Image (cartoon, grey):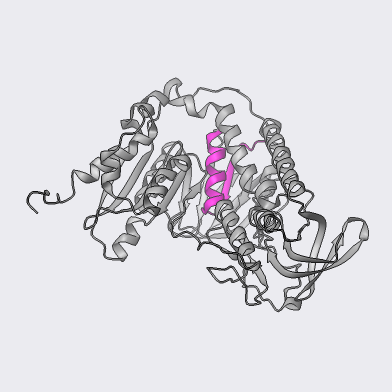
């Protein structure tokens, strides 16, 4: 192993892996330091891949997608155990790790397992298993250490009945009932996944609403779907204390309300995994949530040769955006040309049902004073939706009245995270309403909802004068 590298990447999640491989493609010597058991980071082992695999397993084994035809009592497997849920998860994780290890080997990226901390701005000390300590020097660094669950001292975590979002993947049994604290992305995803297993779920959030960056009309539809299937929503309710009593967990809310359940998931935020990096030795400081601040275009920290990308720099904290951040950071660090981060990227929430959004929400359009019109399509209006037995799901499109430009697409329902990419392409290419009205979509498909929603907006927009009148 060398003593000096062109780029040292700490963390092998989406941002770290993409940066290291991009650096290797440029012919640079890249080192990846990973302190976990295997490469892949939070995304592969406790975040993106496991939660989405769990979701897919639940939807398949519970027969969720077929209940529109066969009724709510329909099941593929009557008794679903924690072992059933983990079987597919372990297979998926093994495959992800094998692919990543192969990519590193093929591109000649050096990897080392251990915990890194700065000695000075250009050197890190790596504490490996077995007590070996390595000191390596880097011309440039990328910090891609990700985040970990926020665990307040006031919450009686025990890994059995009171868990964080990492521990929920290791449960020994499917709970009879579940309380979820925190209606952010992670809390909403797990609450709806367990609800799809017919586990009674109570979702508690201190704020008055959930997912405040999503278009409100979409959230209203989503909220209706959750309540319709029995999810108890306690919005605007602050937690005073949590106690374990007689084999149950009781969450006491301000005002006297309680939520009693078999298991409780605390998913109210995450914090940067930077506390072991000895940031002071590198001249860096983290914020109160242990995250790092970077230049939005280059991903440089306040120390020019040190970059940071991924969840550790905060919103949007997506695997997809983290990959691009890591690649752009590597290009900039090595003096290679790189494009600016995209103005509009899709946001996917893998709840049941899915939510995906790109561009401006109706609230943002109103704030900017843009004259606009919206078009709505219900999935049940499409032939494909009827074939699939969908009785819920919607697409909302927002257009400028003046220019007819597409301003935003917002989808809740089956396949939302796949469908959004059509809207993303048109949005980034500055496309207009006419694209959707004049083009033909495969039939029957859910994508046909784009044409339905566009025509809905078209029929209510002021009509442009004809070419002859002009």
Residue 286 x/y as whole percent: 65, 73
Q: Is residue 466 left or right of residue 439?
A: left
Q: Nearer the viewer, residue 421 or 383?
A: 421
Q: Nearer the viewer, residue 315 or 282?
A: 282
Residue 459 x/y as whole percent: 18, 43
Q: From the viewer's perspective, is residue 68 above or below residue 223?
A: above
Quarter containing the N terminus: bottom right
Q: Nearer the viewer, residue 138 or 155?
A: 138
Q: Bounds of the magenta span?
A: 174-197
Q: Is residue 236 magenta?
A: no
Q: Is residue 410 left or right of residue 191?
A: left
Judged from this view, the residue extending furthest toward the top is: 70
Q: Is residue 72 in sight in this rendering?
A: no
Give the residue at x 76% y 77%: 281
Quarter containing the C terminus: bottom left
Residue 313 x/y as whole percent: 59, 65
Specify the quadrant of the image occupied by residue 442: top left
């Amino acid at each position: 192993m060398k003593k000096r590298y062109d780029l040292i990447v700490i963390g092998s999640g989406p941002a770290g892996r993409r940066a290291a491989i991009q650096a290797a493609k440029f012919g640079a010597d890249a080192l990846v330091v990973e302190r976990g058991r295997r490469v892949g980071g939070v995304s592969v082992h406790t975040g993106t891949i496991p939660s989405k695999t769990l979701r897919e397993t639940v939807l398949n084994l519970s027969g969720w997608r077929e209940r529109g035809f066969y009724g709510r009592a329909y099941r593929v497997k009557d008794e679903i155990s924690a072992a059933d849920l983990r079987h597919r998860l372990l297979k998926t994780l093994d495959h992800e790790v094998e692919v990543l290890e192969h990519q590193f080997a093929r591109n000649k990226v050096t990897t080392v397992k251990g915990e890194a901390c700065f000695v000075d701005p250009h050197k890190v000390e790596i504490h490996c298993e077995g007590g070996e300590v390595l000191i390596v020097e880097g011309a440039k660094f990328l910090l891609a250490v990700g985040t970990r669950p926020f665990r307040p001292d006031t919450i009686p975590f025990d890994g059995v009945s009171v868990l964080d979002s990492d521990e929920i993947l290791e449960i020994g049994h499917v709970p009879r009932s579940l309380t979820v604290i925190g209606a952010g992305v992670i809390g909403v995803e797990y609450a709806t996944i367990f609800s799809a297993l017919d586990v009674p779920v109570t979702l508690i959030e201190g704020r008055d609403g959930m997912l405040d960056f999503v278009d409100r009309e979409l959230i209203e539809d989503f909220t209706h779907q959750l309540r319709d299937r029995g999810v108890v929503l306690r919005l605007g309710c602050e937690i005073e204390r949590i106690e374990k009593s007689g084999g149950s967990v009781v969450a006491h809310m301000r005002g006297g309300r309680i939520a009693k359940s078999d298991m409780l998931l605390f998913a109210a935020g995450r914090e940067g995994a930077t506390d072991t990096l000895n940031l002071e030795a590198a001249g860096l400081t983290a914020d109160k949530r242990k995250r790092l601040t970077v230049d939005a275009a280059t991903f440089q920290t306040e120390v020019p040769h040190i970059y940071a990308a991924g969840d550790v720099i905060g919103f949007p904290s997506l695997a997809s955006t983290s990959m691009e951040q890591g690649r752009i950071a590597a290009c900039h660090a090595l003096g290679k040309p790189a494009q600016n981060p995209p103005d509009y990227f899709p946001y996917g929430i893998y709840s049941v049902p899915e939510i995906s959004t790109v561009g401006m929400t109706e609230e943002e359009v109103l704030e900017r004073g843009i004259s606009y019109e919206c078009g709505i399509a219900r999935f049940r209006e499409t032939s494909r939706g009827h074939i699939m037995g969908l009785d819920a799901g919607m697409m909302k499109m927002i257009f400028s009245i003046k220019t007819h430009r597409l301003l935003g697409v917002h989808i809740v329902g089956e396949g939302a995270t796949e469908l959004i990419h059509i809207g993303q392409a048109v949005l980034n290419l500055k496309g207009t309403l006419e694209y959707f009205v004049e083009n033909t979509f495969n039939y029957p498909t859910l994508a046909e909802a784009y044409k339905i929603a566009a025509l809905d907006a078209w029929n209510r927009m002021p009509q442009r004068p004809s070419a002859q009148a002009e």
